Image: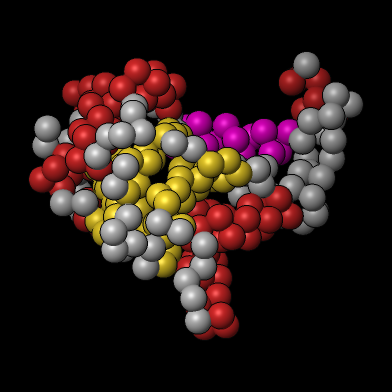
């Protein structure tokens, strides 16, 4: 059926529905996310964390120069999975939206409000011609009203709030571990250790602390911070 759809040209534009009601260009974008490097988000009792594999395949690349996790606002962070160049554009848009909100209203923007804005942008690229959908999903972390939150945004423009989530090529294996080990009462330190165990399971002999990036937002000070890489050597 997929081959028939392609021959009929239903995948030539994101605005063209196939006879069975599918937007094939959007589905291709979701496949790009599945092939992206693994990223994990976990909500803990004292904050929320992001752990991501930078997938630095070339030994000549300076690993520290590869950005996988981004600060959006003082209390919001994000990581992109899929086409990172698409993610960078959306991250920069998110940073601008958060700054504009702060200047206009003199208060930080809620994470959920920012997620909706970015999801609306993604959705628009599935509805209008002349451009392809964004081939990236973004995990957002933040603290809203003393509550740590985690959201995922898909290429379709759909978003969900999670207690724990995984995206990318190793997502299924990571989710198996999350289902078994995740607890809402776990601390961020325990959450980091759990994520590293999951990445070790996914990456096997390719696991290297230098290729792992991490960040968190603490409930107490609502401040985004990067995780010391020493914590990845567990």
Quadrant of the drawing holding the N terminus: top right
Residue name at image x 25 percent, y 30 percent: 194
Q: Main secondary structure of the magenta part?
A: helix
> Residue 6: x percent and y percent?
77, 28
Residue 188 in the image: above or below residue 62: above
Q: Is residue 83 visible?
A: no
Residue 10 in the image: above or below residue 94: above
Q: Is residue 92 visible?
A: yes
Residue name at image x 49 percent, y 76 percent: 107
Q: Quadrant of residue 100?
A: bottom right
> Residue 70: x percent and y percent?
37, 58
Residue 150 magenta:
no
What residue range appears in magenta?
A: 24-37
Residue name at image x 41 percent, y 60 percent: 76
Which residue occupies the extreme right position in the image? 19
For the residue pair 203 and 223, the one nearer the viewer reads as: 223
Its colouring scheme is secondary structure
Residue 30 magenta:
yes
> Residue 225: x percent and y percent?
26, 59
Quadrant of the drawing holding the C terminus: top left
């Amino acid at each position: 059926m997929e081959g028939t759809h392609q021959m009929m040209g239903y995948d030539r534009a994101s605005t063209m529905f196939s006879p069975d009601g599918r937007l094939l260009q959007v589905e291709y974008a979701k496949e790009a996310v599945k092939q992206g490097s693994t990223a994990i988000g976990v909500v803990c009792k004292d904050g929320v964390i992001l752990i991501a594999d930078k997938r630095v395949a070339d030994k000549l690349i300076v690993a520290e120069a590869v950005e996988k996790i981004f600060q959006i606002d003082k209390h919001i962070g994000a990581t992109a999975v899929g086409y990172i160049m698409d993610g960078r554009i959306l991250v920069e848009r998110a940073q601008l939206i958060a700054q504009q909100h702060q200047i206009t209203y003199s208060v930080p923007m809620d994470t959920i409000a920012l997620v909706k804005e970015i999801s609306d942008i993604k959705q628009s690229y599935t509805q209008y011609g002349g451009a392809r959908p964004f081939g990236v999903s973004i995990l957002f972390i933040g603290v809203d009203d003393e509550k740590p939150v985690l959201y995922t945004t898909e290429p379709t423009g759909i978003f969900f709030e999670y207690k724990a989530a995984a995206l990318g090529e190793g997502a299924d294996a990571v989710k198996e571990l999350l289902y078994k080990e995740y607890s809402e009462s776990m601390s961020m330190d325990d959450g980091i250790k759990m994520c590293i165990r999951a990445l070790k399971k996914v990456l096997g002999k390719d696991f290297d602390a230098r290729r792992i990036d991490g960040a968190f937002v603490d409930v107490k000070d609502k401040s985004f911070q990067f995780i010391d890489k020493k914590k990845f050597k567990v």
